[in-house]
Amino acid sequence: MQITIKDLQDLLSSVQRKKIQTLKLKKNKFELILNKPSKKVPQEVVSLKSSHIFKSIHSETINIPPKKTESINSKPSTNYATIVSPMVGTFYHSPAPGEKIFVQVGDIVKCNQTVCIIEAMKLMNEIEAEIEGIIIEILVKNGDIVDCGQALMKVET
């Protein structure tokens, strides 16, 4: 993968427009870490696969605030990670209508386990968990439009 100055400029511009605080991009021996310090909001780390970043930079974005749909308990957990969308698209919790959903609140997920699908430009992209833990909250509903970097699920670690 060849990264040009134009790609980096587009990436920086995209990060500035989004609510992303930290972005880490690692491909083979290349590693890029972008930090956007904020006094008001605690830093949230967003890790995206490089193949998804450059596809989403040139996509149109629709900013729709995430909706809280399910929660395993009323007490907020302090030890959780967030699974984020690596692209703009439509969130689906199952491979097809009427089929078994990938994960529910309370399910244990393992690394590289598919947790949902994001449809972008008629392509179904499986989103995998990058951590192990228990799904404590699903932040979007089936069929919702999600933005690049938007939180999809909270996983208690």
Image (cartoon, rainbow, N blue to C red):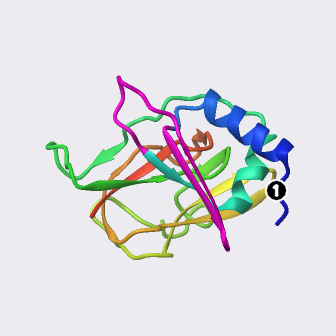
Q: In terms of image quadrants, where is residue 133?
A: bottom left
131 or 137, which is in the foreground?
Answer: 131
Is 39 included in the stretch rendered in magenta? yes
Could you tell me residue 147's position as x and y percent?
61, 39
3 or 76, which is in the foreground?
Answer: 3
Check the picture and name the quadrant holding the C terminus.
bottom left
Q: In terms of image quadrants, where is residue 9?
A: top right
Amino acid type for the residue under numbered disc 1: Ile
- Figure label count: 1
Callout 1: few (<14), some (14-19), or many (20+) C-alpha neighbours within 10 Å? few
What residue is disc 1 on? 3
Where 156 sits versus 66, above or below? below
Position of 56 compared to 127: left or right? right
Identified at 36% across, 29% down, the residue is 41
Identified at 42% across, 65% down, the residue is 103
Return the residue found at the far top: 40
Position of 43 compared to 88: left or right? left
Identified at 66% across, 72% down, the residue is 29
Residue stretch in magenta? 21-44
Position of 36 compared to 68: left or right? right
Could you tell me residue 74's position as x and y percent?
16, 42
Could you tell me residue 124's position as x and y percent?
71, 62
Could you tell me residue 40's position as x and y percent?
35, 23
Identified at 19% across, 49% down, the residue is 77
Return the residue found at the far left: 75
At mark 1, the secondary structure is loop
Is 78 included in the stretch rendered in magenta? no
Check the picture and name the quadrant holding the N terminus.
bottom right
